[in-house]
Amino acid sequence: MSKYSDELTYNFTKGIAPPVRETRIGVCSAYCGTCGDLNEDVKSGCAQVQSRKFAQSGGCQLGLAVGIASSITNVVTIIHSPLGCCSGFGGQAGMRKTQRETRGKRNEDFVWLHTNMDQLDVVNGGIDKLREAILYAEKEYNPEAIVIANGCVPGIIGDDIDSLVNELNGRLSAKLVPVHCEGFKSRYVASGYDAAYHGFLRSLLEPIKQYDRVFPDEGQDALERYKNSRTVNIFNVGSNSPGDENELSRLVSALGLFPKVVPLHNSLDDLARLGDAALNVSICATHDDYLLGHLKELFGTPYIIDTLPIGIKNTNRWLWKVAEFFGLEDEAARVIKLENDQLLEALEPLKKELKGKKIFVGGGETRILTTAEFFSSTLGMELVGVKAHNVDRFVEEILEDVTGPELVIEVAAGQPAEELNIINKLKPDLYCGHMGANGWVARLGVPNLPLFGMGLNFMGYSGAYELARKAVKVLKNTNFVKNISANVNLPLRKEWFDTDVKDNIKENDLV
Ligand code: SF4
């Protein structure tokens, strides 16, 4: 079903870790130039071997892997590493509660423990500390699963966490889920999604065993079969809001299908039923191609990995692909026409405010390109540049489709100094970007809005309206960023802004 299915094979092995994305799909993590040049360089393989002379810190795959794995109901996460690897988790305490409550799920704390490895453990090994942490987690919290996220230090010294899991398996009520997300293994942070899902595939996804009913009920059986044959698993991502999930579920329901939003914030029982659905549909290839490919292999469930449903054009396309699978093109045509007519009428006054304004979009590759397409094609804004965390084969087609060949593109995970340099030269009226970047951009005096957010809706038709409405609102009064810019300095020298970011990109030393 996927347009990528011919290119990628997903030979799932119960091996301890997935291949990193550098080897699995090829990825560019450093680039500055035009979209046209990048397209050529990705095809020739040159873009994938670029690096940078001066680099600020980027993300680590451990953070993403923990974010995915710890979202499951009644799970405890143990981070096996020195304490520093956990520095980002302190601020996430409330996020899990909010994420769950806003989806009507049981309220739960984000419970994470760490093994606090020190110098002595580097010499003697940290397995004893990990064993102690696992036994503590079982006794204290009685979770259904204990996720063990392995950091760089135990990875480098060779702590054999899988042997420990084998030793304890069967002695505990919790399922043990080793996740090999050592940061040093990949420059591509999104490898963390594969690491987490590999852990799920190895240790959690056991299909529920079906027994014959004690009292046969053919009617009920037929009903269940019918429901399963019309069920669509919509694979959510960490940056989804409940509003996004509601909107996509609404659209799938409008086709007469049964949507299920999985796997984040689901229970182990829900995960065990993943194979019941007739179709798995992705909303972001960066997150879940590894999982969907392997679910097809394990359960035979077809899947669609196509576009991210942001803006009118890409929402139409996403919905059409789902309908096409079930032969529901007529229904899709009706839903799309109704939604498009209403939305375009509602957008008219907003378009007048935004037309001709310059915009720059930064963040995850698929999300920025679909968001940029909406701002430029539908709202009539002038797209002056984009910044992608990474670029891989999943956006080749969108890259050609959405952007002009002369459009400025920077590829960098993190690296705010480079992004600020480019934004300072392009001088957009509005910046739409990944969380974390907006604070820096505000210091340049550029009005900005988030690319995603938990309390907001970005996807589907209602998300498109919200996005346009937010952009108008931000541009109505720009005094806030003007004041920030006038009173808060950027920690960058003037000389840096005079340099060309292209000069900071070089060929990888390891090539
Ligand atoms: S890169 Fe390694 S040491 Fe740094 S936070 Fe990630 S796992 Fe920990």
Image (cartoon, rainbow, N blue to C red):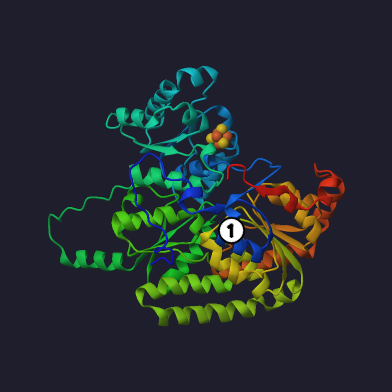
Report the residue at 80% width, 54% height from top: 481
Report the residue at 75% width, 50% height from top: 503
- Residue 316: x and y in percent read 51, 74
The one nearer the camera, 55 or 489, is 55
Is ligand 1 less than 8 Å from the beta carbon at label 1? no
Q: Which residue is mark 1?
A: 365
Vertical comparison of 442 with 283: above or below: above
Residue 256 in view of the camera: no
Residue 162, image quadrant: top left
Vertical comparison of 170 with 40: above or below: above
Report the residue at 52% width, 60% height from top: 393
- Residue 293: x and y in percent read 38, 57
- Give the side of residue 440 with respect to residue 138, left or right: right
Vertical comparison of 213 with 77: above or below: below
Answer few, some or many: residues within 10 Å of disc 1's Cα (few below 14, many 20 plus, some between 14 and 19).
many
Vertical comparison of 2 with 27: above or below: below
